Amino acid sequence: MIENYRIELRYARAEATGEYEITRRNTRRKKTVLVERYKTPVGLFLPDEWLQLALKAIEDAGKNKLLEQIKDYTREHAAWIHSEKDVEFHAVDCLCSGAYRYWENFHYEE
C-alpha cells in the first residue's frame, strides 16, 4: 500500500566513515559524513532507496495518473521547487502521505 511509504520522520546524522584524519594539534579524529534517513511504517530508508520503493508501490497500485496530476500541480504552485527530480520527490511524498486530499483547488478522482 502507498500509505506504508509515508514519511513519519526525516533525520540526518553524522556517521563515521571508518577513516581517520590528523588534526593540526596532531591528534587523530574520525572522519564523518552526513547521512539522511526516512522513517516510514515499513522501515528506515535512504532518500533514493525510499523514492524507488515508493514509485514501485505507486505503479503497483495503479496511481500513475494521480501522480502526474500532483506533479503538474506542484510545478504550478510550489515556486521553491526548481529541478524535475525535486518535483517528483515532492509529488511522491504528497501522494504517500495523502496531503493532496487537503489542497483547496486540486481535483482528483480515486
Image: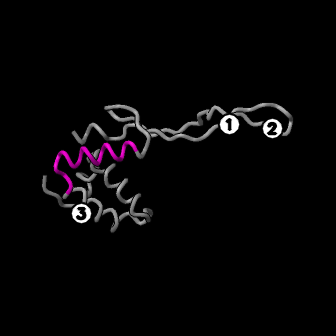
Q: How are the colours assigned in the image?
A: one colour
The residue indicated by pointer 2 is 23
- Crowding at dot 3, Cα within 10 Å, few <14 / some 14-19 / many 20+, comes out as few
- Residue under the point 36% across and 54% down: 90
- Residue under the point 43% across and 64% down: 83
> Which numbered disc, 3 or 1, marks the residue that appears first in the sequence?
1
Q: Which three-letter amino acid code belongs to the residue tagged 1?
A: Lys
- Residue under the point 62% across and 33% down: 16
Mark 3 lies on a secondary structure that is loop
> Left or right: 61 with respect to 84?
left
C-alpha distance separating marks 3 and 1? 48 Å
C-alpha distance separating marks 2 and 1? 11 Å
Closest to the camera, between mark 3 and mark 1, is 1
Coordinates of residue 25 in the picture (x, y in percent): 86, 35
Q: Quadrant of residue 26?
A: top right
- Crowding at dot 2, Cα within 10 Å, few <14 / some 14-19 / many 20+, comes out as few
> Left or right: 97 with respect to 1?
right
Q: Determine contact: label 3, label 1, CB under 8 Å.
A: no
Coordinates of residue 99 in the picture (x, y in percent): 29, 49
Does residue 75 show up magenta in the picture?
no
The range drawn in magenta is: 49-64
Magenta highlight: main SS: helix
Mark 1 lies on a secondary structure that is strand
Residue 53, above or below 76: above
Of the pair 3 and 102, the residue shown nearer to us: 3
Q: Which three-letter amino acid code belongs to the residue tagged 2?
A: Thr
- Crowding at dot 1, Cα within 10 Å, few <14 / some 14-19 / many 20+, comes out as some
The residue indicated by pointer 1 is 31
The residue indicated by pointer 3 is 105
> Which numbered disc, 2 or 1, marks the residue that appears first in the sequence?
2
